[in-house]
Image: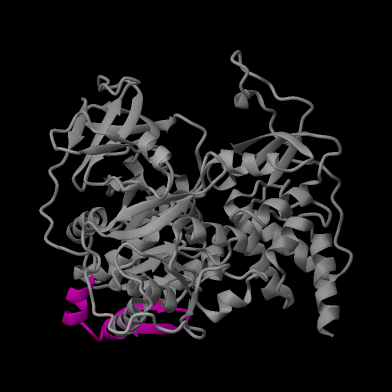
């Protein structure tokens, strides 16, 4: 089968805001968003977002202008996203946890008019702050208006730029995906037809993921309440489950590994997930683990969807699994096209391959984004004229995914053409990490791989040193100042040379597995070391860990560092910076840092 296409739904909405506006009028006093004990009704959210939109328009932010958005997770995040869209501008999401230097780079690259933030985020920046980008703080500093009569203009219309989201770049430079509102309108219409009204829906993903917009806006299109998880709740499964129970959450959209972790936790706390009805996974190939199967088997009223797509095309398939869960396959198929998408499986000549034959997956129809902001060469290479469409000017996106058509026109995902990988729901281009490593004078060559699967997966960097090799802690600190935490490798392996293929390229399959370490267990020597060791063991899922055992060599990875920091604060009453874990990833080193900070406080 060359292509499988569902007819594009008749788009009843003209803008990405119409679904929200319906419920703001219909149920103004119903809760729209809640986080950390603070709630806003639809009326309150609408009023606060409108006020922000007026201010932004007065500062010259309207259609086709880009506004940086770096806000602490909470109700303010919902206000900020909605306010930028109401102004007619496009938002550029930034994560407060990412290195400030990276945020300044993407703000400049996108030509952001200003950045919307808050005092808490600004206080944590380095001396260079936001660089040359003007700052608008939701709770503090604001620039003087530049437009005297900023009348409301078009907002969220199909052809308007909605957001610019930066992802890892294979050349070592992040790339900004410029997405217009039209594909999101189509997807939101689809959600309105396929999910229940008035959900209490978890908002889990970081704002830097396109999924975060869908979490918020689809909830409001359905008249529901978005429960925004705080950073500590996102990284602590016990806290996340408690949040779900406290607010009777009915709908979650999670990375595959996070749903498995929640399901495993539910075995000892089944009441905390009893209100869940709609489960959705995304960000990686769907896997039905024993824990997920057990959860859904015990709750036949639950169903499980998997959203397949990418930031460049949104969601293009969403197969649904319903009871009995005992009959679900371990690796469900990817499904049929949705939301007006055209999906092709093509050979190297862009010709359709027969059913059951592997090819590369391309996506056409309504979904493709405009392209990569300011990168015409990359855009031309990835967004191609669609030779299989009769529509003038039609384009298709080259996903880099491998797949094949199975009987009945069902797509099966088979892996990647290139080295791009997914780690715990995050999209990572190893080339960006490798490029930064090679910039060091003491590194000659570098290769980055994902080791393991599922919850146990982590990044390993293989290096050839130029002279005296740097230490793992030096490399973690170096990369941690330049990359988001998910992109910082856990393990560093130095080799005298790399294995090569017949064509002279690095043979990644022949690289040795990292040594997991086998140091003798060393017992804690005081209560601080004991508490630090217990925290590391809990995060790693171990019964115990020695005080000299390296957290990363024992299976820890960068996404768990935040959880370590939060648990140490709860156990010892001291807030360690994340870099302390990267620089000293043992219980002994962390305990030493805790003692130092306590002495400073007096």
**Figure check: 381 above or below 600:** above
Residue 158 seen in the figure: yes
The magenta stretch spans which residues?
A: 20-45
Residue 277 in picture, x, y percent from top left: 31, 62
Residue 471 in picture, x, y percent from top left: 81, 46
In which quadrant of the rendered view does residue 92 lie?
bottom left
Residue 482 in picture, x, y percent from top left: 64, 54
The residue at 72%/52% (across/down) is 478
Residue at the extreme top: 502
Q: Classify the position of the N terminus by image quarter.
A: top left
The residue at 49%/65% (across/down) is 269
**Figure check: 276 above or below 488:** below
Q: Is residue 76 left or right of residue 574?
A: left
Residue 399 seen in the figure: no
On whether residue 129 falls in the magenta region, the answer is no
Residue 501 in picture, x, y percent from top left: 61, 17
């Amino acid at each position: 089968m060359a292509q499988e296409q569902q007819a594009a739904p008749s788009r009843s909405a003209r803008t990405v805001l119409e679904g929200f506006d319906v419920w703001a009028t219909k149920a103004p006093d119903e809760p729209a968003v809640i986080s950390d004990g603070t709630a806003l009704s639809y009326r309150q959210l609408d009023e606060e977002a409108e006020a922000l939109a007026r201010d932004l328009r007065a500062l010259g932010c309207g259609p086709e202008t880009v506004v940086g958005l770096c806000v602490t997770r909470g109700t303010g995040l919902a206000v900020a996203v909605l306010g930028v869209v109401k102004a007619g501008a496009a938002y550029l999401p930034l994560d407060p946890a990412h290195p400030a230097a990276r945020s300044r780079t993407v703000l400049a690259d996108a030509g952001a008019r200003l950045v919307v933030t808050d005092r808490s985020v600004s206080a944590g920046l380095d001396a260079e702050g936001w660089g040359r980008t003007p700052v608008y703080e939701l709770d503090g500093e604001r620039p003087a208006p530049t437009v005297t009569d900023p009348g409301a203009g078009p907002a969220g219309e199909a052809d308007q730029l909605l957001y610019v989201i930066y992802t890892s770049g294979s050349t070592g430079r992040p790339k900004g995906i410029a997405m217009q509102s039209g594909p999101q309108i189509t997807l939101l219409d689809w959600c309105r037809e396929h999910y229940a009204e008035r959900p209490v829906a978890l908002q889990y993903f970081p704002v830097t993921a396109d999924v975060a917009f869908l979490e918020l806006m689809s909830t409001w299109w359905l008249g529901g309440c978005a429960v925004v998880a705080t950073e500590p709740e996102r990284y602590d499964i016990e806290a996340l489950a408690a949040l779900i129970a406290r607010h009777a959450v009915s709908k979650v959209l999670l990375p595959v590994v996070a749903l498995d972790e929640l399901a495993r936790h539910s075995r000892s706390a089944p009441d905390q997930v009893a209100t869940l009805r709609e489960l959705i996974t995304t960000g990686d190939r769907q896997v039905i683990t024993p824990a997920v199967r057990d959860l859904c088997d015990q709750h036949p009223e639950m169903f499980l969807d998997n959203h397949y797509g990418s930031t460049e095309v949104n969601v293009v398939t969403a197969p649904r699994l319903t009871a009995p869960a005992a009959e679900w396959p371990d690796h469900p198929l990817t499904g049929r096209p949705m939301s007006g998408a055209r999906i092709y499986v093509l050979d190297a000549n862009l010709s359709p391959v027969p059913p059951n034959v592997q090819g590369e997956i391309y996506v056409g129809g309504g979904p493709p984004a405009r392209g990569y902001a300011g990168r015409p060469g990359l855009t031309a290479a990835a967004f191609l004229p669609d030779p299989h469409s009769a529509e003038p000017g039609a384009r298709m996106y080259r996903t880099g995914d491998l797949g094949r058509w199975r009987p009945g026109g069902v797509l099966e995902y088979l892996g990647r053409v290139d080295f791009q990988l997914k780690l715990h729901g995050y999209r990572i281009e190893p080339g960006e990490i490798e490029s930064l490593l090679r910039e060091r004078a003491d590194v000659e060559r570098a290769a980055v791989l994902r080791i393991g699967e599922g919850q146990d997966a982590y990044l390993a960097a293989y290096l050839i040193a130029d002279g005296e090799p740097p230490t793992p802690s030096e490399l973690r600190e170096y990369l941690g100042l330049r990359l988001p935490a998910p992109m910082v490798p856990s393990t560093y392996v130095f080799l005298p040379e790399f294995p090569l293929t017949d064509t002279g390229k690095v043979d990644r399959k022949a690289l040795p597995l990292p040594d997991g370490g086998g140091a003798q267990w060393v017992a804690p020597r005081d209560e601080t070391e004991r508490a630090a060791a217990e925290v590391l063991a809990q995060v790693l899922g171990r019964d115990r860990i020695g005080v000299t055992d390296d957290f990363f060599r024992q299976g820890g990875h960068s996404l768990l560092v935040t959880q370590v920091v939060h648990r140490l604060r709860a156990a010892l009453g001291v807030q360690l910076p994340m870099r302390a874990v990267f620089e000293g990833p043992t219980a002994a080193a962390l305990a030493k840092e805790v003692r130092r900070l306590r002495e400073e406080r007096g």
